[in-house]
Image (cartoon, helix red, strand yellow):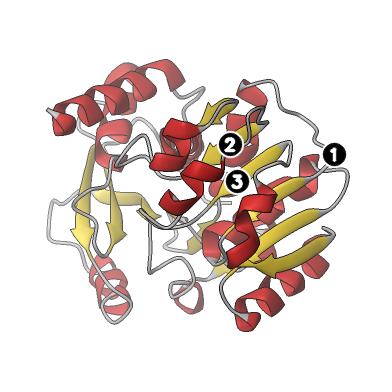
Amino acid sequence: MPTTSSHEARRAAVLGSPVAHSLSPVLHRAAYAELGLDGWTYDRYDVDEQGIAGFLSGLDEPEPGARRWAGLSLTMPLKRAVIPLLDEITVTAASVEAVNTVLFSDDGRRTGDNTDIPGMVAALEERGIRSVESATVLGAGATASSALAALARICEGEVTAYVRSEERAREMRGWGERLGVAVRTADWARAAEGLRAPLVISTTPAGATDGLAQAVPASGGTLFDVLYDPWPTALAGAWRGAVIGGLDLLVHQAVLQVELMTGRGPAPLAAMRAAGEAELRARAA
């Protein structure tokens, strides 16, 4: 595992495309301030799948006097595209073939990790959810596979994944087999049926679940919607049970990233969440 000296000022950033909306700089900078990491910087760069190799290569030849890199946060579409460019990935990242964190060791090695999975588990535990009998996952893709990995730790029974194509259905069943989760797939047109599960995890893009808002059951379980902007989503706004939002996931996974990149901990969860909430309020205004 890469090691980082927290006594030396370093730099970090979030990469993705688009990335202008990312809250990660706000969260990480708030953590640096609380931890007294003067001189640490965290920026954002719009990098797509075609540009990631060049970006990483550029880090190998820093400008004279430039701060060394501690790590990168990755968002879509880079979580899988980056894997061939790394020296190694952790067991957690390998389990879903998705990397959202790149760590740089002092000897130059690049290690990929995934903090989405433990971050999701931590967000659920914060709300007292440590075990569920069954669950629903809305959508497919990298975030959905991370949701299945998180459910592998807490779900005792079957997970039903609602998807839009047979190809996606096969992918989700495959992830279930790989992760040790009993996954049943169903067509998206029947997704309203899944809202009755004790835990519903929505991993879809903005607007995709708006049509389900009118189908929310009178007595719902817990909805975990991974979006944070715009918030609340139509589904979250109509939900009649407990709601966990994308900011909860973002903060918990960022806490783990800060600890991995800086070598300092515990990261200031409350301060990071407060900074994220303030930024979202400012954007809404």
Element assignment for label 2: strand
From the viewer's side, name the closer residue of 174 and 166. Answer: 166
Pointers 2 and 1 in contact (CB under 8 A)?
Answer: no
Where the C terminus falls, by quadrant?
A: top left
Count neighbours of disc 3 (C-alpha within 10 A) and say few if under 14, some if 14 to 19, many if 20 or more.
many
Q: Is residue 25 left or right of residue 129?
A: left
Residue depicted at x 19% and y 32%:
39
State the residue position of label 1.
133
Element assignment for label 3: strand
Q: Is residue 81 left or right of residue 167?
A: left
Residue 160 percent across, percent down from the top left: 74, 57
Quadrant of residue 131 in the image? Answer: top right
Disc 2 marks a residue whose amino acid type is Leu
Q: Is residue 230 visible?
A: yes
Residue 15 percent across, percent down from the top left: 29, 59
Residue 155 percent across, percent down from the top left: 81, 43
State the residue position of label 3.
201
State the residue position of label 2.
223
Q: Is residue 279 left or right of residue 72?
A: left
From the viewer's side, name the closer residue of 116 and 209. Answer: 209
Considering only order in the chain, which callout, 2 or 3, is on the residue closer to the N terminus? 3
Considering only order in the chain, which callout, 1 or 2, is on the residue closer to the N terminus? 1
Considering only order in the chain, which callout, 3 or 1, is on the residue closer to the N terminus? 1
Element assignment for label 1: loop
